Image (spheres, helix red, strand yellow):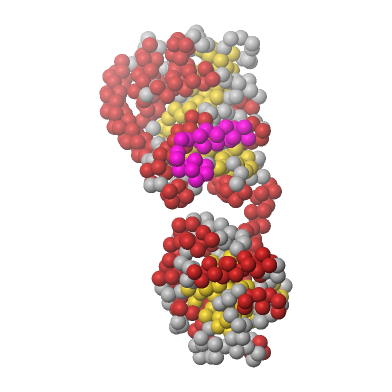
Amino acid sequence: MKLKLTAIFAAAVLLIFGTVAAHAAVYTVDEPTNGDTVYIAGDPDMYPIEYYDVRAKEYKGILPQLYKKISEDSGVDFSYINSGTSNEQYRLAKNKQVELVSAHAKGDVDFLSGEVHILTYNNGEEEVELCVGFTSIASDDLVNTVTSALQSASSEQILRLAVETAVNNSPNDFPFWLLFAAIGLVLLCAVLVIILIMRRKKEKLAKENRLADPLTGIGNSLYFEEWYHNFISPASSALYYIAYIGIDVQQILQYADAAVSEEIQIYAASEIAAESGEADFCARVSDGRFALAFEAPVEAQAKEYIERLLTRLNRFNSDVMTKYHIHFQAGVFHLDAPNIPCEKALFNARHGFYHARETGESYVFADAKLLRREEYVRGLKNKLRDALDEKEFRLYVQYIFDGTGKTACGAEALSRWDSPDEGVIPPTEYIRMLETAEMIDELDFYILEECCRTLQEWKQTPKKNLWLSCNMTRITLSNENFAERFKAIVKKYDFDIGKLVVEITEDALAESQKQVVDNIAVCKQIGCRIALDDFGCGYSSVRDLNDYPIDIIKIDRELIIESNKEKGKQLLCGIVKLAHFLGIQALCEGVENEEEMTVSVEAECDYIQGYLLARTNPANEPSVERNITFR
């Protein structure tokens, strides 16, 4: 065994001067009793750190001497359980017959609630960390006392302790010439130890900087991973829950500057750290996101813990959080099996967090049911991505007519999934699937490209004067990279950009209203027209007319149906007049019978769309086009 300098010197001195005599307050006993003492499971063959002297029938070495000093300072007696020359640490720890498991390699002994590092040595193959551990029956006072004493014992103190012990117990026929050699060795080692200490301090500082989050002062993602691997053992994993806690930083930055976001996160870090117990640990893993590992014996207590913590986090006195209803949410995952990798545990907890955001709940436990749903969504994503890659989605159109219903002047682009397995699937069956798989933007951009290609092809046909409306969900329009992708696709094709209409659908509320406004402004700047779908219901409202540079409103079919009543007819006429007053054209959609057609014409709508005039068909279906007059 090749010990580092501290251990090498200690071994040399002990070999020269002899062994350490046991103090009266550090005993070696055959079996544990009910006496007032702290029981230790020692390693009988960890010379010179700790070893069992067969002749004296007691433990000796550096650690027994340290326990002696702890005993003198604290009045606590220690007793090694005499197991002879065989190492019984694992058995004694498992049966909870001892409070302390003395010198052992880190991770070699299970059933420990904590470990204190003593030194590191090389066994010829790898670096080994030598530790002293505590079982679950060790009191907090004992753990704190021993930990403090061992951590405060520097390399120099261990050297001095070894020398003093050896000198005080040297035999009468000791060869004094060896003493002078040993003194020279001491001086040499002292110099080397100083160098080693300085190097270790530098390495420790570098490691602390590498593991620290510069904004909040708590650990970062590397810190969390290291503590997860080193602190959570297979035996203790069932007690732990991993929480993924976050706040929407992007939403904060819509209404405030970065300083406010940082202030909120610094506060959150201090509250999470304050709520954490001695066996818990936390870190800031990304902007606005925190990871926390905490102990709870049952799920009910875990829920109480996370509710209490979220209450603390959300009581921060911030005008932005209060005014715009921004708050912390969490996902929680129970380590219900041993040896779950840190990455997977955080992944599962993160799914709980995203589900909480989706449903508006304060927190969600990522249980088996939720994780099965996520597995289904991942499979769905793969299936839909394959369909997009294989171009299984086809472009369909429904022609749009002028206010008289006689001439086609435009068309709305729609999609159908032409599945090799299921045949043609309507959008009502797969749009929601795409939204669930968070892939609706991929379909939007796919159809955009098909629209651009179609407009280019129409230049050489009777449809050269038609405009084509391409649906864009508000979710897609919320993307930060929307403008870049949109312009890149449009530039690939040769057509009149004024004939491309970007139609804002009413599918869902925008994730970032400001981003939607900015992206629509880009579309308008490059020459596209903007249409607002389903005006009068859902998420479309009069406010949209103020927020967006709208060219066309598509009046929802529900209002067209209601126009068979006098009040409904007046409402339809009023909406068309409002649009015209604002310089916006009006389109009545979903016109399916002559009565609805008559009302739409009388309301002076600019455009009419519906099954009465043209059904949805593939973009270039000759049989349909024979009966249509194009502008």
Name the quarter where the C terminus is drawn.
Answer: bottom right
Query: Which residue is drawn at the image coordinates 49% and 84% (left, top)?
Result: 456
Q: Is residue 237 above or below residue 607?
A: above
Residue 418 is left or right of residue 245, and the answer is: right
Residue 606 in view, yes or no: yes
Q: Position of residue 455 (x, y in %)?
A: 51, 82
380 magenta-colored: no
Residue 450 in view, yes or no: no
Residue 156 is left or right of residue 362, and the answer is: left
Query: Which residue is drawn at the image coordinates 46% and 51% (left, top)?
Result: 250
Residue 476 is left or right of residue 260, and the answer is: right
Name the quarter where the N terminus is drawn.
Answer: top left
Q: Can you tell which quarter of the image residue 260 is in?
A: top left
- Magenta span: helix, strand or loop, mainly? helix
Q: Position of residue 524 (x, y in %)?
A: 43, 70
Residues shaded magenta: 302-327
Q: Position of residue 112 (x, y in %)?
A: 58, 28
Residue 239 vs residue 496, the one in the foreground? 496
Residue 345 vs residue 287, the one in the foreground? 287
Residue 143 vs residue 568, the one in the foreground? 568
Q: Is residue 536 above or below residue 146?
A: below
Residue 529 vs residue 361, the one in the foreground? 529
Count of numbered labels shown in the rendering = 0
325 magenta-colored: yes
Q: Can you tell which quarter of the image residue 566 is in?
A: bottom right
Query: Which residue is drawn at the image coordinates 62% and 65% (left, top)?
Result: 571
Q: Position of residue 290 (x, y in %)?
A: 49, 42
Query: Which residue is drawn at the image coordinates 57% and 81% (left, top)?
Result: 402
